[in-house]
Image (cartoon, rainbow, N blue to C red):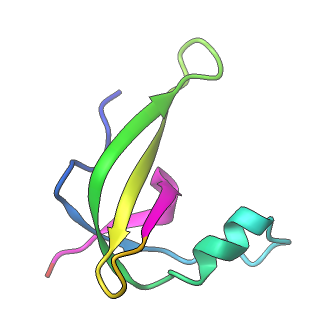
Amino acid sequence: MDPKYEIGQKVIVRPVSDQALSQRENDIESYAGQVGEIFNYYWISPRTGEVFYIYNVRIDTNKKDVVVYEDELEACLS
């Protein structure tokens, strides 16, 4: 399975679910709706046949680097 996003691609951090938030999810929530650029990614495979991509995103507004799961991103079309 190939990654959904590429290095250099602009993305928007999506809000996480409204369920009980972990500390990590709570930190990501503060970046919800902000645009950033993917500068690196890697994958993990906890079980044979499963692949999850994790992305390093540099947020445009404050140049902060955050680590985001693939399902917490959407492509920025503008």
Name the residue rendered at 31%, 46% in the picture.
40
Q: With respect to residue 67, does 12 lie above or below?
A: below
Q: How many marks?
A: 0
Tell me if 28 is positioned left or right of 58 in this view: right
Name the quadrant of the N terminus. top left
**Outermost front residue:** 63
**Horizontal and vertical percent position of residue 42:** 41, 35
Q: With respect to residue 48, does 36 lie above or below?
A: below
**Horizontal and vertical percent position of residue 6:** 22, 48
Along the line of sight, the residue nearer the viewer: 72 or 34:
34
Name the residue rendered at 19%, 60% in the picture.
9
Name the residue rendered at 75%, 78% in the picture.
18
Q: With respect to residue 13, does 67 lie above or below?
A: above
Along the line of sight, the residue nearer the viewer: 48 or 31:
31
Q: Secondary structure of the magenta portion, mostly?
A: strand
Q: Which residues are magenta?
A: 65-77
**Outermost top residue:** 48
**Horizontal and vertical percent position of residue 14:** 48, 74
Say if the magenta span includes residue 62.
no
Tell me if 48 is positioned left or right of 1 in this view: right
**Horizontal and vertical percent position of residue 35:** 32, 79
Say if the magenta span includes residue 72.
yes
Along the line of sight, the residue nearer the viewer: 50 or 29:
29
